[in-house]
């Protein structure tokens, strides 16, 4: 399976793995699965830190670089095709990070791993729910 991690799933996997369901943990640990991250995840993490909604134990840049290295994920490039796909999606809300992550899942044929009920209700892309 090719798994695109929603921002909160990526952060939880690194700092609060107990928040992950057993199914999500199993899939993330399966060496046959590919883990993917979008640059939107980095942007959203930086935004959360800047707004004070996320505190990291170390310098933010150093933490992010180390976290990306430890995750060993493939990078889902933010392309024009991904940008165009955001207009074709109807998520029922307009959160830009959610739109870009969902569009990335569509364009790259990835399964979006998320606990966000707003993203889990769509039938426009595959999901792996963290419940």
Image: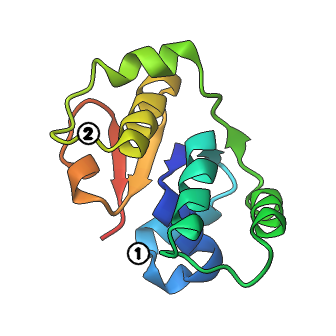
Residue at the image position 49 percent from the left and 21 percent from the top: 82
Residue at the image position 20 percent from the left and 29 percent from the top: 90
Where is residue 122 shown, x and y percent of the image?
21, 39
Residue at the image position 37 percent from the left and 53 percent from the top: 128
- Residue at the extreme front of the image, as rendered: 51
Residue at the image position 55 percent from the left and 80 percent from the top: 17
Residue 119 can be seen in this image: yes
Q: Earlier in the sequence, mark 2 or mark 1?
A: 1
Q: State how many labels appear.
A: 2
* Classed neighbour count for the residue bearing mark 1: other residues with Cα under 10 Å, few (<14), some (14–19), many (≥20): few
- Is residue 70 left or right of 126 when viewed as pictured? right
Q: Determine the image quadrant of residue 111.
A: top left
Q: Which residue is mark 2?
A: 94
- Is residue 51 left or right of 130 when viewed as pictured? right
* Classed neighbour count for the residue bearing mark 2: other residues with Cα under 10 Å, few (<14), some (14–19), many (≥20): few
| Residue 21: image tag | 1
Q: Determine the image quadrant of residue 131.
A: bottom left
The reply to whether dot 2 and dot 1 touch (C-beta < 8 Å) is: no
């Amino acid at each position: 399976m090719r798994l695109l991690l929603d921002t909160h799933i990526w952060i939880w996997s690194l700092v609060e793995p107990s928040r992950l369901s057993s199914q999500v943990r199993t899939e993330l640990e399966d060496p046959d699965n590919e883990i993917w991250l979008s640059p939107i995840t980095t942007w959203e993490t930086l935004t959360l830190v800047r707004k004070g909604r996320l505190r990291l134990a170390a310098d933010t840049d150093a933490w992010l670089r180390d976290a990306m290295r430890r995750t060993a994920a493939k990078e889902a490039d933010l392309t024009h095709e991904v940008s165009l796909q955001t207009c074709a999606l109807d998520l029922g809300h307009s959160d830009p990070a959610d739109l870009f992550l969902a569009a990335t899942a569509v364009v790259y044929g990835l399964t979006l791993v998320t606990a966000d009920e707003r993203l889990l209700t769509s039938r426009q892309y595959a999901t792996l729910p963290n419940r």
